[in-house]
Amino acid sequence: MSTVLRVGVVGAGAMGADHVRTLTTAVPGVAVTEVYDRDTERATQVAQGAGGSVATSAEDLIGSDQVDAVVIASPDSTHADLAVACIAAGKPALCEKPLAVTAQDALRVVEAEVALGRRLVQVGFMRRYDPGYAHLKATVASGALGEVRVVHNVHRNASSTTSATGPGIVTGSMIHELDTVAWLLDDEVVGIRIESPVRDGLPDPQLATLEMAGGALATVEVFVNAGYGYDVRCEVVGTAGTAALAPAPSVSTRIAGVDGVAVASDFVAHFADAYRIELTAWARAASAGAVDGPTTWDGYRANVVAEAGVAALVGGARQPVLSASRPALYAVGAR
Amino acid sequence: MSTVLRVGVVGAGAMGADHVRTLTTAVPGVAVTEVYDRDTERATQVAQGAGGSVATSAEDLIGSDQVDAVVIASPDSTHADLAVACIAAGKPALCEKPLAVTAQDALRVVEAEVALGRRLVQVGFMRRYDPGYAHLKATVASGALGEVRVVHNVHRNASSTTSATGPGIVTGSMIHELDTVAWLLDDEVVGIRIESPVRDGLPDPQLATLEMAGGALATVEVFVNAGYGYDVRCEVVGTAGTAALAPAPSVSTRIAGVDGVAVASDFVAHFADAYRIELTAWARAASAGAVDGPTTWDGYRANVVAEAGVAALVGGARQPVLSASRPALYAVGAR
Amino acid sequence: MSTVLRVGVVGAGAMGADHVRTLTTAVPGVAVTEVYDRDTERATQVAQGAGGSVATSAEDLIGSDQVDAVVIASPDSTHADLAVACIAAGKPALCEKPLAVTAQDALRVVEAEVALGRRLVQVGFMRRYDPGYAHLKATVASGALGEVRVVHNVHRNASSTTSATGPGIVTGSMIHELDTVAWLLDDEVVGIRIESPVRDGLPDPQLATLEMAGGALATVEVFVNAGYGYDVRCEVVGTAGTAALAPAPSVSTRIAGVDGVAVASDFVAHFADAYRIELTAWARAASAGAVDGPTTWDGYRANVVAEAGVAALVGGARQPVLSASRPALYAVGAR
Amino acid sequence: MSTVLRVGVVGAGAMGADHVRTLTTAVPGVAVTEVYDRDTERATQVAQGAGGSVATSAEDLIGSDQVDAVVIASPDSTHADLAVACIAAGKPALCEKPLAVTAQDALRVVEAEVALGRRLVQVGFMRRYDPGYAHLKATVASGALGEVRVVHNVHRNASSTTSATGPGIVTGSMIHELDTVAWLLDDEVVGIRIESPVRDGLPDPQLATLEMAGGALATVEVFVNAGYGYDVRCEVVGTAGTAALAPAPSVSTRIAGVDGVAVASDFVAHFADAYRIELTAWARAASAGAVDGPTTWDGYRANVVAEAGVAALVGGARQPVLSASRPALYAVGAR
């Protein structure tokens, strides 16, 4: 417990600032020593709150002798290069999802890690650290549900930004389910179809059907303009029973004829605990010079499936998921 | 209130016997006067319990001057002919679903009614009388959910008989949802796709996607070997919110580490109230010489969509739903 | 099934009118033939809707050769005399709770029945027919909860009339729980204490503690100005587990940040099914010339406990419940 | 953020070991430097896991220049003296509940703090840090419930040790509610009554009624042999509505006819988050040389009410709560 992990954070936007806040107030054994953002003012504000300094570039931060490990929370388009830079520098990193904008770029990160021979970059699929999802996976693994046949997913936001696009909903929102289902079942998505109820304007909600290599099917509804709030549901249906995430409100009220509970407003509130647990686990592993969370291969797979999803959304037909072969470094059960 | 509706029941199997029990113990203004079943012993037992007599044939029962109205609960293959016979005799009937085995046969019933010029046959889509579904439809109609984009349905049985087949699951089980979704949205199904997670043996569960004429999509999971019990769920997703059937257990227990409620064992238990309300409403209308429930057109439409579903199940591709034109007798809002 | 039970209804206020509506639309084998109310206009309106005639007095109605059985839904102060009159006439009756205004008057009814030697009057403790309470009692009786130690009850109305008084809340509202707990446990209340959080003005809510002869304790919160709606809760706590009434909303919605269900507005809506089942069971038994529901002894016992409760409310101290001895006609298990 | 708070922990039993585990794995800015326990082996095991050393006595630990702040998790009888020692040493402390075995001893700690003129000792009423209770208090404070009239509490353990006694249940278990209700309402308990359903052997469950100075009433059921699991419930009833802790299971399952969620096995599992948040908040405040959680006055008040409760349990009658006057140091709103 004597040494402190010195963390550098690239990106001081909403996600980066939130990670810094969590690292400094809720994760033991960590100090945020450097922050970089293209917006220097924003970087300064976040760095000061954490007692760290401002780096002059992402590259300098990654190379700094004041930084033991790196959190990548900059714009998506920079993720792959920064992840490769962390691998080159031999420093553990937590890279926000997606690992890359294209599957091809994600594969570059995978290949860099494979060339190094060990895992240094963890992808920010934080749902795996959510107590509900973790309990759900344990329930599946226990065999209590029998053989899994179907997984139903619902993923709703109150409203989207005006820049939302059909493909962007797949790569930015549905990508969570593309990873989660594979992880829950220890399986891989081999086919995807996406339909959307209204064909003019933004295709939202989107209904996806995922075919798993093992024969199960998964449905995903992503609705980024659901109006009423943020909501994530997942039910696993087996031959002996089902298990589902249970909403976990802290208080229920009965007022004016309604017996109700509040719905979370956004994912930050909904998954606050998952982010804290993710960062704590990552910091603990990074202190030992490695990572043991979602792999760059998981990040690549999610990109590959998302690209098939975008093609399916546009063309309407089912798309096969074609990917590179899984390197031995990411053999199942490696985590 | 002075006259009693004299009801004849064709079919004294599980469904017919249950209808007789409900009619005699829970529906006012009704007497079951005649019962027919190919199995005379069974007919006798059911008739005696109700204080009625045994008819020598279904045709005799329909023509009997002791019978004002008819409940058809005989094997599916006899439904269409019996419904036509009731129309010919000018007697109100409640015909168990499906109205016919083929859409073509169902259309014969529709045409007989259209020729007569008034509605005499009601199809046993009893879910429309379930308080939950009725409340759900009222919620949709209130506009509180905004514009409906998606309807999610789940329909599970604990286990199926060994004679279950893929097409049989569509025409026998999923047919409820094929009617329910159209009714909930006052819309029609114009396309259907069905996928099943495991391709060898019985295709079960089945995941269907329904395209509605108005642009909404509906998903349906039918799983007739779900193991844990009987379960029917429905969630309507609109642009302003969602509404779902709420499970209505009467008691919850906390025993041995579990806070739980019982799941219904079968549809008879789950929908007992719906059957009672259906029969009460039908008897009230029949006493006035008419019916006002699910129409033969609804029964025909369900058959048409089911036939497209069977084709989709076999071929894998999306199937359009091609049907005759809606006669004026069944204009929307006629009920 | 051939004969119809001809029912006379005394009292055409809200409760009486609702009973007539239920009897004519939801109970088989019944005709409402006569109605009496001091307000002739009201009686006429209710009688016409049911196809019956207006009686000139309650006594005439009870004595009429057009009336086989009587529902007593007139003001509380008339209950005991009318019940005695029904016994004298040898006609089965359903008497709304309370059986009498005083325990002494209730005992008169008991004694009349004991003198006759058979049970003719059933008291309207309709909660015993509510599916939830019935399931709860069956769960207790199954032994699954072990030995019962505590029963918690909550009974809330949105608002009370301005004429509400502390004693009136005990005798008019809490009286339901005074009966229910004894019935649930097949036990008797032997002591009662009532406290109220605010001592000036109307004592509301009231918190009662009931001591049962068998050693268990029960708590009761009655709050007739709870503001948010009508709510009845009951939890039985045993040495092996607990069982509770489960709220049974038909639909849940997620709108504007709230995941909620509607609370019933009043007891008529909440217990509609219980009233229907009660009247159906009573009519079936009355058709055979008897009753088998809550007895006049149950009605008397509730009055005795309520009187002790009123004394406890005023004096603050625990009051013993002193009652006559249970006649053999009402031996436990007689129902 | 540069300095680390060096924490000494007195007591390496279940509670102490759990606090050390939480401090080292989930609380930032903290190092456990010394551990003391009468059982040296146990102390050694816990100290080694945390990277700390073993102290030779509690007094040495409190006086050590390697200890900035102290967690007191030793047997109850030692709490008061150790708390006074921490005050004498000028070191912030977190003292597990109860603050003392008797109200008189608790008052000694209060007086020591008052003499010092600032708050150094925080009592381990960790429920105040539970997200559910915190949300409940915020809901009460928001005014959304109107004026609070009643608080219902349930507190159940699966089973008690064989050494459980009636008074011990009051001082060891119910003491949580004695503090919680006062804190929720910003009010004080001025009277208490306790009844128990079975009079022979262990009085368990216990039903307490608390009178608050402001006029509200609270009920408490403590049942330490509830059989089915650990369960804590709290409902606040106001004139405009109610709010209650909502059970927060992470997963619900439907298996073998039951739709259920798991009940926590014990308080450590149920309140794990509350302990983490408590220790994090305490460490943050202690790093600044003070505490801002439940005060020694709160600890004293809970002891005073518990002593009245024990008298009430034995004697049966309502007992007034007589206490010293609140020193200015603990004025309401001081936290």
Image (tube, coloured by chain):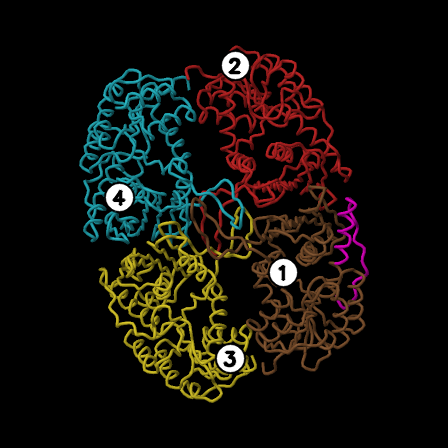
Chain colours: A red, B brown, C yellow, D cyan
Marks 3 and 1 sit apart, C-alpha to C-alpha, by: 32 Å
The three-letter amino acid code for the residue at tag 3 is Val
Q: Where is the N terminus of chain C found, in terms of image quarters?
A: bottom right
Give, as a three-letter code, the residue at label 1. Arg
Q: CA distance from mark 4 to mark 1?
A: 53 Å
**Chain ID for label 3?**
C
Q: Which residue is mark 2?
A: A67
Tell me the distance, in whole angstroms, between the alpha carbons under discs 2 and 4.
Answer: 53 Å
Residue D256: x percent and y percent? Answer: 53, 48
Kind of residue indicated by mark 4: Val
Mark in front: 3 vs 1:
1
Residue type (three-letter) at the residue carrying disc 2: Val
Q: Which residue is mark 4?
A: D170
Q: Secondary structure at mark 4?
A: helix
Q: Are marks 4 and 1 on the same chain?
A: no
Q: Image check: D211 left or right of A7?
A: left
Above or below B43: residue D141: above
Q: Secondary structure at mark 2?
A: loop
Task: Please tell me in which quadrant of the rendered image residue C109 appears.
Answer: bottom left
Name the mark nearer the viewer: 2 or 1: 1
Whole-angstrom CA distance, mark 2 to mark 3, is: 85 Å
Looking at the rendered structure, whether the residues under marks 2 and 1 are on a common chain is answered as: no
Q: Which segment did they paint magenta? A: B303-330
Q: Is residue B88 left or right of residue D141?
A: right
- Chain letter of mark 4 equals D
Residue linked to disc 3: C46
In the picture, residue B285 is in which quadrant?
Answer: bottom right
Cα separation, mark 3 vs mark 4, equals 58 Å
Q: Which residue is mark 1?
A: B127
Magenta-colored stretch includes residue D322 = no
Q: Secondary structure at mark 3?
A: helix
Relative to C261, say whether C52 is above or below.
Answer: below
